[in-house]
Image (cartoon, rainbow, N blue to C red):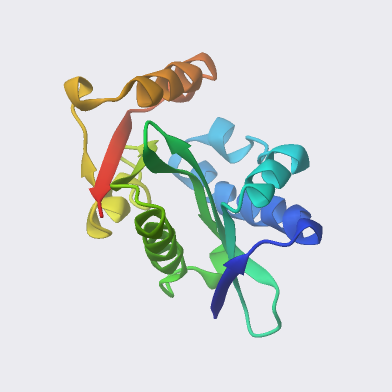
């Protein structure tokens, strides 16, 4: 498997990966998360143009996992990490996170941040195994607070959410 920048013509495949990965939420009683639409092609293209949309490709070159990120308060914020269930449990998500960490370090950014579900096994507990820790409310930066308000407006606070950080 290789990690590379997503190509513009692959962005619909990223949406497919997101939809497939999202179906797992239905199995744990979170159907509205499972039914949530992936980022639009325009949004994904913005990440791609900014150089912050990476994919892990299979042996045929087809993306099977992706990560998109943006800079928030001087850190690289992981907006989305998704692995197609057919390719899960092979370290692809972790490899993408480590790739993003190397990119952030090269850019002189001190940390990775993300917001995720606190009690979903493949969310906060997974990220803890990848070196992230939960931030207390007092540790949240203005940008993370704004992202949390946006999520609350979308109804994601129906389930506990947590902001996390990994120093580089």
In this view, 56 is above or below 150: below
Residue pictured at 76% horizontal, 43% vertical: 41
Residue pictured at 47% horizontal, 25% vertical: 156
Side of 51 relative to 141 (left or right)? right
- The quadrant in which residue 157 appears is top left
Q: Residue 85 in the image: x percent, y percent? A: 55, 63
Q: Residue 15 in the image: x percent, y percent? A: 70, 50
Side of 125 relative to 90 (left or right)? left
Side of 4 relative to 141 (left or right)? right
Q: Residue 64 in the image: x percent, y percent? A: 61, 67
Residue pictured at 62% horizontal, 47% vertical: 50
Q: Residue 63 in the image: x percent, y percent? A: 66, 68
- Looking at the picture, tell me which residue is in the foreground, 92 or 125: 92
Side of 1 relative to 157 (left or right)? right
Identity of the residue furthest to the bottom in this view: 59
- Looking at the picture, tell me which residue is in the foreground, 131 or 76: 76
In this view, 64 is above or below 149: below
- Looking at the picture, tell me which residue is in the foreground, 84 or 111: 111
Identity of the residue furthest to the right in this view: 9
Number of numbered discs visible in the structure rendering: 0
In the rendered image, the quadrant that contains the N terminus is: bottom right
Residue pictured at 50% horizontal, 19% vertical: 150
In the rendered image, the quadrant that contains the C terminus is: bottom left
């Amino acid at each position: 498997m290789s990690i590379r920048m997503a190509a513009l013509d692959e962005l619909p495949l990223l949406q497919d990966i997101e939809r497939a990965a999202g179906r797992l939420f239905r199995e744990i009683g979170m159907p509205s998360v499972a039914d949530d639409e992936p980022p639009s092609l325009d949004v994904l293209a913005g990440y791609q143009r900014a150089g912050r949309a990476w994919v892990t490709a299979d042996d045929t070159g087809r993306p099977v996992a992706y990560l998109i990120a943006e800079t928030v308060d001087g850190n690289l914020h992981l907006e989305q990490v998704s692995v197609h269930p057919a390719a899960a449990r092979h370290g692809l998500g972790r490899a993408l996170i480590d790739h993003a960490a190397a990119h952030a370090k090269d850019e002189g950014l001190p940390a990775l941040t993300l917001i995720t579900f606190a009690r979903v096994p493949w969310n906060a507990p997974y990220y803890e195994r990848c070196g992230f820790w939960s931030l207390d409310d007092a540790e949240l930066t203005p940008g993370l607070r704004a992202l949390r308000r946006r999520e609350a407006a979308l109804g994601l606070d129906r389930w506990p959410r947590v902001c996390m950080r990994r120093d580089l």
